Image: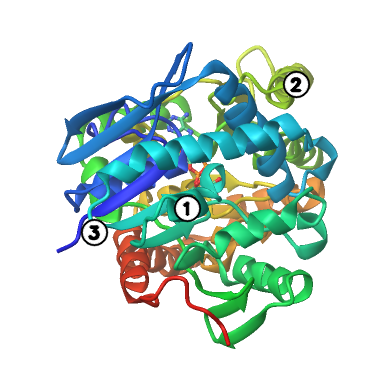
Amino acid sequence: MSRLIVVSNRVSPPSGAGEESVGGLAMALSAALREYSGVWFGWSGRTTPEFTGRLHIEKVGGVTAATVDLEEIDLEEYYNGYANKTLWPLFHYRVDIAAFDRAFDQGYRRVNRRFAETLAPLIQPDDIIWVHDYHLIPLARELRSLGVKNRIGFFLHIPWPAHQVFISLPRHRQLVESMFDYDLVGFQTAEYQQAFEEYVLNEAAGAVVREGQLSAFGRTLDVGAFPIGIDAPEFAEMLKTGRARRMRDLMTACTVFRHLIVGVDRLDYAKGLEERFLGFEHFLQQNPDLRREVLMLQIAPASREAVEAYQEIRGRLDALSGRINGEFADVDWAPFRYVNKTYRRDELAGIYGAARVGLVTPLRDGMNLVAKEFVAAQNPDDPGVLILSRFAGAARQMREALLVNPNSAEEVADALRRALNMDRAERIRRWRALFDNVQREDVAAWRDAFVRALRGAEELRPAMVS
Ligand code: ADQ
């Protein structure tokens, strides 16, 4: 069977339940590759004064990790710059804070070229290549220019924004044109796929050849929706571990006579943390009867600290959490616990398991795996309630959650009240439907569907459209 080569910005091969880095992509890829004896290629996380293209090869847990160092300027322009100051905010509808800087654009293309040049010699004729996320959109274009003819697929982990939002990106056309060098482009939801199609039809004079296949720029491209999931069997095993149980017991002991409301996110403005804090504050104001019955725990480890927008939001959240406790806490009780730490995955599973409510309210999110982890961790006989933003990709599959508009403090507060008052029969009914979905559409199903579609994608490259 052909090898699978996975390419993503960072490489973090599986190392057990504990210390993998925080982030949905890392979780998903280490789980996906565990089954394949594939190669995972990307940036080493280190910088050198000058780019050498030297590969570091390491075998970890059945996966060959091949990494390359970048220059400091690459990190500034490509990673902190174009990826995280331009594309990330724009694709999450934050045009107001997106930075448009030609140096970022050039750095982005330079690093994609460097990745392609370093990767190309590793590729064997039968390999299939699966590229991940917004850092590497033009990678196929660079690989093709080096003569790589293999099948190459791309999966976007974040939303594809609406047409009018996307065209605020300078050189948007070149970016989309470069996507037509892939054989298959996958999105998290049908909605993002449609937004992409709308762009291709309206801005690139493209056409729908048949369902799931587009033509434009003289080429054809397969497109599809592949909703990502969690590693359901691994998660179930993790719940049985001593650490998970201990953490659940500890959290249960901390909340005797009270309900735990939990939020777990990377500290990112797209996750709607400020709005969530305000929603919780509104809930406390509006529900004096329930005030002393809840403890909200928000876990939010810092991420992308080199980007100003992330430093600013951290300051605002510190102030807001202090204000909420200042306003409502008593000598023997405080309603809000806000921690900026990373936890082991088994410990997180235990925390979810002790919670009565999972509060997952991103302003925009490609999918959101925390929503799925929360559901997977619940006790079937007495499950907690998931409150989920309608702007998370996960809301498409998780209809039985309490869906809210995360921008509305009132809606979040109402949903909290409803969740806390929900009887057991309704909680079980909703949870069962959610759990079935989390089990069925898990990370293995996602990987297999994508790889199958990529293998089946049209063989001739480039396919000329008559
Ligand atoms: P992320 O934006 O990183 O992922 P998400 O899908 O929620 O978001 O994944 C976060 C992961 O990090 C979860 O597995 C969670 O358990 C873990 N995590 C969060 N906080 C943690 C903490 N304090 N300690 C330890 N682990 C923590 C991107 C997209 C998402 C998409 C994923 C996968 O933005 O929309 O769902 O990729 O495609």
Disc 3 secondary structure class: loop
- Residue position marked by numbered label 1 in the rendering: 145
Question: Residue 84: image x %, image y %?
Answer: 64, 34
- Residue position marked by numbered label 2 in the rendering: 312
The type of residue carrying mark 3 is Pro
Could you give the CA–CA distance between mark 3 and mark 2, rounded to whole angstroms?
A: 48 Å
Structural crowding at the residue carrying mark 3, measured as other residues with C-alpha within 10 Å and reported as few (<14), some (14–19) or many (≥20):
few
Structural crowding at the residue carrying mark 1, measured as other residues with C-alpha within 10 Å and reported as few (<14), some (14–19) or many (≥20):
some
Q: Which mark is residue 125?
A: 3
Disc 2 secondary structure class: helix
Q: Would the CB of label 2 be found within 8 Å of ligand 1?
A: no
Structural crowding at the residue carrying mark 2, measured as other residues with C-alpha within 10 Å and reported as few (<14), some (14–19) or many (≥20):
few
Q: Are marks 1 and 3 in contact (CB under 8 Å)?
A: no
For residue 174, above or below residue 300: below
Residue 266 visible in the displayed image: yes
Could you give the CA–CA distance between mark 1 and mark 2, rounded to whole angstroms?
A: 41 Å
Q: Which is nearer the N-term, disc 3 or disc 2?
A: 3
